Amino acid sequence: MSRIGKKPIALPAGVKYTVDGATVLVEGPKGKVTAMLPGGIVLVQKDGHLIAERQTDKQAAFHGLARALVFNAVTGVTTGWSKDLDIVGIGYRAELKGKGMVVFTLGYSHPIEFPLPTGIEVTIDPKQTHLTISGIDRQKVGQVAADMRSLRKPDPYKNKGVRYTGEKLKKKVGKTGAK
């Protein structure tokens, strides 16, 4: 029994959707997003809400997935998605270079240039240690944040690196001297 699949999706004013085979195109005030719709799952509109219904119990595994993908698309075109990253370390920083390039200085011998994909915006605070990645496609926002984090993962010994805001790190104790 899919509890997530049974939840209705609120359809705000100004949001339209069209189903074309296995894809759903959701249009809203912020733009357009496409979501995949597994076979055997049908979207039904009732009382200003979208409901994902499965035709047989063979599609039970995809019921919640289909609902979540459509919900993410509807939320993306109305409010958008964002992820926050913190850069911790002496001399570690990020800066915008032009419109679609972020340059990281992360303790390597060279700065790292990170090109931004289309539909993704990055804002950097004046201290150059806090980034906010935003866009309408949840998967793309999360992937860009993960790629930026992987440039210098948080070090458990020195607590330096790029991390998600609010991410807890377990600090490890270094080697002890031989006695």
Image (spheres, rainbow, N blue to C red):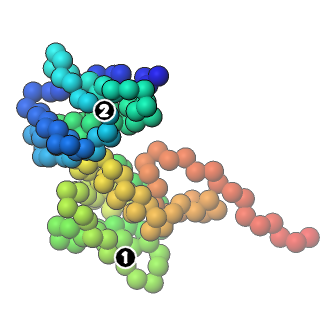
Tell which of 132 and 11 is nearer to you: 11
Q: Quadrant of residue 51?
A: top left
* Looking at the image, residue 61 lies above or below residue 48: below
Among the two numbered marks 2 and 1 on one chain, the one whose residue lies closer to the N terminus: 2
Q: Any mark on residue 146, and which?
A: none
Q: Give the residue displayed 50% in from the left and 47% down from the top.
A: 167
Using the numbered discs, state the Cα–Cα distance from disc 2 to disc 1 in whole angstroms: 44 Å
Residue at the bottom extreme?
109
Image coords of residue 82 (percent x, y): 30, 46
Image coords of residue 35 (percent x, y): 25, 44
* Looking at the image, residue 98 lies above or below residue 147: below
* Looking at the image, residue 19 lies above or below residue 105: above
Res 16 seen here = yes
Circle 2 crowding by C-alpha within 10 Å: few under 14, some 14–19, many from 20:
many
Mark 1 is on which residue type?
Answer: Ile
Q: Give the residue displayed 38% in from the left and 26% down from the top.
A: 56
Q: Which residue is mark 1?
A: 112
Q: Is 90 displayed left or right of 136 in the figure?
A: right
Q: Which residue is mark 2?
A: 41
Q: Nearer the viewer, mark 2 or mark 1?
A: 2
Circle 1 crowding by C-alpha within 10 Å: few under 14, some 14–19, many from 20:
some
Mark 2 is on which residue type?
Answer: Ile
Q: Give the residue displayed 47% in from the left and 75% down from the top.
A: 107
What SS does tag 1 mark? Answer: strand
Q: Is 38 displayed left or right of 167 in the figure?
A: left
Image coords of residue 162 (percent x, y): 45, 61
Count of picture labels:
2
Tell which of 21 and 49 is nearer to you: 21
Q: Is 159 displayed left or right of 72 in the figure?
A: right
Do residues under tags 2 and 1 come within 8 Å of each other at their CB atoms?
no
What SS does tag 2 mark? Answer: strand
Image coords of residue 58 (percent x, y): 43, 31
